[in-house]
Image: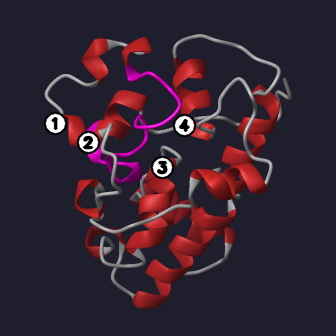
Amino acid sequence: MTRDISFDPMLTPKEMLNKGIFGGTYFAELINYQNYPKDWFKGLSKECYISDKYLAEINYFKIKSGQTQKEWEEKGWIHEDDPRGWFEWYCKYFLGRRHQDDERQIKRWSAFCGPKGRWRSIIYSKIYNEGCGIKFSENVSPRIQQSLLHWSYIVNNKDFENWKKTKKLD
């Protein structure tokens, strides 16, 4: 595995599920949620993780975000050992599995929301341009923020301040 890529997700899979991700549909197809620790699901309504229908209200930002399984497959993002994509890979990685696909998935995470990640930079740019600061940023591009949450990233003041320094702002 490449060691120069910093891989530091902010949340555990359990914390992500409890925040509200994937419209509650994540475990509805292809994989068996019972293969994962029972405490990840403790206190959660089943519609939060095995809903047959995408429920935007389940998501933390109460908005539909993300692409379909079919779109993931068409883009070649799926490894046969993790047919539900990045989050399935992350769950297994978090539980200790190391796999031939680790480097690719970590690079995808980094490109999405790592320190120089595209969507991390975009959301901080939008927050800066809104002039609202992190404290009042939840209404700034909730779709992007929900997508970032799907990758275990939450907008925060420390990263916002670091982003501003790299852009030589303020």
Residue tagged 3: 150
Q: Is residue 92 above or below residue 145?
A: above
Q: Which residue is mark 2?
A: 48
Q: Amino acid at mark 3?
A: His
N-term-proximal mark, 2 vs 4: 2
Circle 4: residue type:
Phe
User: Mark 4 against mark 1, which lies toward the viewer?
Assistant: 1
- The earlier-in-sequence mark between 4 and 1 is 1
Q: How many marks?
A: 4
- Seen at 49% across and 64% down, the residue is 160
- Label 1 neighbour load within 10 Å: few <14, some 14-19, many 20+: few
The residue at which mark 4 appears reads as 87
* Span of residues in magenta: 18-33
Front-most of 10 and 131?
Answer: 10
CA separation in Å, label 3 and label 4: 8 Å
Give the numbered dot on residue 128.
none
- Pointers 3 and 4 in contact (C-beta within 8 Å): yes
Please report the residue visible at 44 percent of the width from the left and 21 percent of the height from the top: 32
C-alpha distance separating marks 4 and 1? 19 Å
Which type of secondary structure does the marked residue at label 1 adopt?
loop
Identify the residue position indicated by label 1 in the image. Answer: 45
Please say if the residues under marks 3 and 1 sit with CB atoms less than 8 Å apart. no
Give the CA distance from mark 2 to mark 3. 14 Å
Mark 4: which secondary structure? Answer: helix
